[in-house]
Amino acid sequence: MACCRLSSGKLIRFYQLIPLYDEELQVKMQYESIDALLEKFDDDFSYVVDIHRKHYLK
């Protein structure tokens, strides 16, 4: 999560969602951390949602 504090003092928080395949979610749940899953993604992974993105665990 990223944050940005405005000059008015108001804090804005930025969240990001990554759609996961079932197997990817299982890895995330098994290690209780998204870091274990993100290590399996390669250099061409994009945080822009792509409904046709490759499955990184197959």
Image: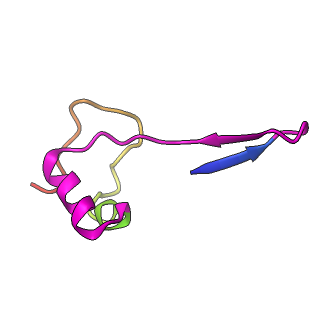
Looking at the image, residue 52 lies above or below residue 18: above
Camera-side residue: 58 or 29? 29
User: Which of the 4 quarters of the picture holds residue 31?
Assistant: bottom left
Q: Which residue lies at the image location 25% right of the left edge and 44% below the top edge?
A: 20
User: Which of the 4 quarters of the picture holds residue 21?
Assistant: top left
Question: Would residue 12 be found to the left or right of residue 20 on screen?
Answer: right
Q: Position of residue 54 (x, y in %)?
A: 19, 43
Give the magenta part as a residue range.
6-34
Camera-side residue: 9 or 46? 9
User: Which of the 4 quarters of the picture holds residue 46?
Assistant: top left
Q: Which residue lies at the image location 24% right of the left edge and 30% below the top edge?
A: 51
Q: Position of residue 19 (x, y in %)?
A: 30, 39
Question: Would residue 55 be found to the left or right of residue 1 on screen?
Answer: left
Question: Would residue 15 be found to the left or right of residue 51 on screen?
Answer: right
Looking at this rendering, what residue extends furthest in the top direction? 51
Q: Position of residue 18 (x, y in %)?
A: 36, 42
Camera-side residue: 22 or 45? 22
Residue 32 among those drawn in magenta: yes
Q: Which residue lies at the image location 23% right of the left edge and 38% below the top edge?
A: 53
Looking at this rendering, what residue extends furthest in the left direction? 58
